[in-house]
Amino acid sequence: MEDSVAGFADEDELYRYIGGIFETALADPELAPKLNATGLVLRMQCTEPDSALIIDLPGGVVHKGSAPDLPAAGATMAMSTETANAYWQGKVNLTFAMAKGKVKVEGTVTKLLQLAPLSKRLFPVYVERLRADGRDDLVVA
């Protein structure tokens, strides 16, 4: 991954793009049951800027922020918004990123790793959404 990749400006952008990818997946008749079956509530905690999403796969809902009334996360992924953006374009190897400390994972890592093959199908959809919004600044070359 190149160092010049952009991250998001705020939590709203994190929700729009990363949250939007999960909402797309949760609406997909083929992917939704597989995501639901993981039973995982995932917290994406990002830096630069500080922002968070709670992705409730069994409930089929994506929440912005980290209010106390949201479902408790079974796993947390922590990374910069730059890394999150690059990951969803297929430009970050999760295992290497974890080894290098670019992505920190807490909780049920096995369930999290179950998501990896499913998420690969969303990479082109994510890039398409960025381009449709005229956000070429976020597209990794």
Image (cartoon, rainbow, N blue to C red):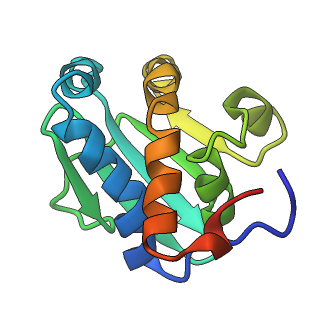
- At x 50%, y 20%, the residue is 117
- At x 47%, y 51%, the residue is 126
Question: On the picture, is 118 further left or further right than 96?
Answer: left
Question: On the picture, is 53 further left or further right than 81?
Answer: left
Q: Which residue appears farthest toward the bottom when viewing the image? A: 9
What is the total number of numbered labels drawn onto the structure image? 0
Question: On the picture, is 84 further left or further right than 126?
Answer: right
Q: Is residue 113 positioned above or below 83 on the image?
A: above
Q: Where is residue 115 in the image (x, y as percent from the top left)?
A: 44, 25
> In which quadrant of the rendered view does residue 4 lie?
bottom right
> In which quadrant of the rendered view does residue 33 lie?
top left
> In which quadrant of the rendered view does residue 3 lie?
bottom right
Q: Nearer the viewer, residue 7 or 50?
A: 7
Q: Is residue 107 positioned above or below 123 on the image?
A: above
- At x 60%, y 64%, the residue is 81
Residue 87 visible in the displayed image: yes
Q: Position of residue 51 (x, y in %)?
A: 47, 71
Q: Where is residue 141 in the image (x, y as percent from the top left)?
A: 77, 56
- At x 55%, y 74%, the residue is 135
Q: Nearer the viewer, residue 64 or 91?
A: 91
Residue 52 visible in the displayed image: no
